[in-house]
């Protein structure tokens, strides 16, 4: 089972390096030096250099990401999991650490944890194609476990075996676009997925190593996966007018996601600190929202008189909301309390009236 899980984790797409942050040329050289050491197989030296850099800049997300990749390449899975977990806690707006965390969990057959991590990646970035593909693979593996259990309980059920065989074929070696051992890697200029920012090449079959991070200053052909972008930990300086426009755009995107019944985007508009009404647990509130939104033949949410007040990294948005669905049409005054996390304005409190 361990071998099968290892092979399956290699089927998932691991984002192997962080791309350029808004930083100085000197810092870019540091990232490139660590990347070159990894590609040369000098993992202890790469880890030592990363630790030396982080001693002076302990919150730097890109170097912390690279350190997690080095730990994974070194076989230090538990340490890599710890590194990526802490990244998700400190920078919850970044989807890439969630994705890599999911791949590591899948390698340990912890598919429920892998699913949760991928759902968080998609919540932070609903357009993250790699996470969507990986989530499909995890669901397929969970289905495989369920079909196996069904066969154990009822071996005479003729409908189960063909389904199980189909999934096993899906994850057989040399599938999912994997290249033969020794073949040249994909060019970083030829996307292997529908990602819009960078190519992500398929994982190589065992025992090929996981990709080394691509350098920041000189792009190089990846062994497994090309560099994926990691957003800056802090947004670039903006004027109050720009902040207001960004917050207004976030409110309108929230309303649009609601109208489209796009639950990942809708729920992703709420921050970790969101306080559900009525002292509900967050999970219960989300389940209730799904039940009320998904399945309606039509939902329309429009806003009027939107006014946003900015105070540092906090904002208050007030507007009149017009909601219309299959059997309900209502208008009300709505207030959203928001905070800026990274580059995104997220809802932390929602109230009606006033």
Image (cartoon, rainbow, N blue to C red):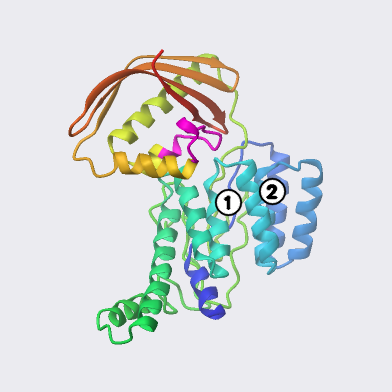
Q: Is residue 276 magenta?
A: yes
**Residue at image x 33%, y 81%?**
165
Q: Position of residue 158 (x, y in %)?
A: 25, 83
| Residue highlighted by disc 1 | 97
Q: Is residue 192 visible?
A: no
In the image, residue 129 above or below residue 152:
above
Image quarter for residue 127? top left
What segment carries the magenta color?
A: 267-281
- Circle on res. 162: none
Q: Callout 2 environment at 10 Å: few (<14), some (14 to 19), or many (20+)? A: many
**Residue at image x 69%, y 36%?**
24
Element type at mark 2: helix
Could you tell me what secondary structure mostly forms the magenta stretch?
loop
Q: Position of residue 237 (x, y in %)?
A: 60, 23
Quadrant of the snapshot with the C terminus? top left
Element type at mark 1: helix
Q: Position of residue 221 (x, y in %)?
A: 55, 61
Q: Position of residue 213 (x, y in %)?
A: 62, 57
Q: Is residue 116 visible?
A: yes
Q: Earlier in the sequence, mark 2 or mark 1?
A: 2
| Residue highlighted by disc 2 | 63
Mark 2 in CB contact with mark 1 (< 8 angstroms):
no
């Amino acid at each position: 089972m361990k071998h099968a899980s290892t092979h399956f984790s290699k089927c998932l797409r691991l984002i192997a390096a962080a791309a350029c942050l808004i930083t100085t040329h000197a810092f870019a050289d540091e990232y490139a030096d660590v990347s070159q050491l990894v590609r040369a197989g000098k993992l202890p030296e790469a880890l030592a250099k990363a630790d030396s850099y982080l001693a002076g800049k302990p919150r730097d997300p890109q170097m912390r990401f690279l350190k997690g990749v080095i730990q994974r390449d070194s076989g230090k899975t538990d340490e890599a999991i710890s590194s990526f977990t802490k990244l998700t806690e400190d920078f919850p707006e970044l989807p890439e650490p969630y994705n890599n965390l999911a791949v590591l969990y899948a390698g340990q057959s912890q598919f429920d944890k892998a699913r949760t991590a991928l759902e968080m990646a998609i919540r932070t970035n609903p357009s993250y194609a790699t996470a969507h593909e990986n989530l499909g693979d995890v669901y397929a593996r969970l289905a495989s476990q369920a079909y196996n259990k069904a066969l154990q309980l009822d071996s005479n059920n003729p409908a189960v075996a063909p389904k199980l065989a189909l999934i096993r074929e899906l994850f057989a070696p040399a599938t999912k676009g994997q290249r033969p051992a020794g073949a040249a890697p994909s060019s970083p200029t030829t996307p292997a997925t529908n990602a819009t920012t960078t190519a992500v090449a398929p994982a190589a079959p065992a025992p090929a190593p996981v990709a080394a991070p691509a350098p920041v200053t000189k792009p190089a052909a990846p062994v497994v996966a090309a560099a994926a972008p990691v957003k800056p930990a802090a947004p670039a300086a903006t004027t109050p007018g720009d902040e207001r426009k960004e917050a207004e755009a976030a409110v309108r995107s929230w309303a649009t996601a609601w109208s489209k019944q796009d639950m990942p985007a809708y729920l992703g508009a709420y921050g970790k600190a969101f306080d559900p009404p009525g002292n509900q647990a967050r999970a219960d509130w989300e389940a209730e929202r799904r039940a009320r939104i998904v399945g309606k033949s039509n939902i329309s949410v429009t806003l009027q008189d939107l006014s946003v007040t900015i105070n540092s990294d906090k904002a208050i948005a007030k507007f009149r909301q017009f909601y219309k669905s299959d059997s309900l049409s209502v208008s009300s005054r709505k207030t959203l309390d928001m905070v800026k996390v990274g580059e995104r304005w997220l809802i932390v409190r929602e109230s009606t009236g006033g």
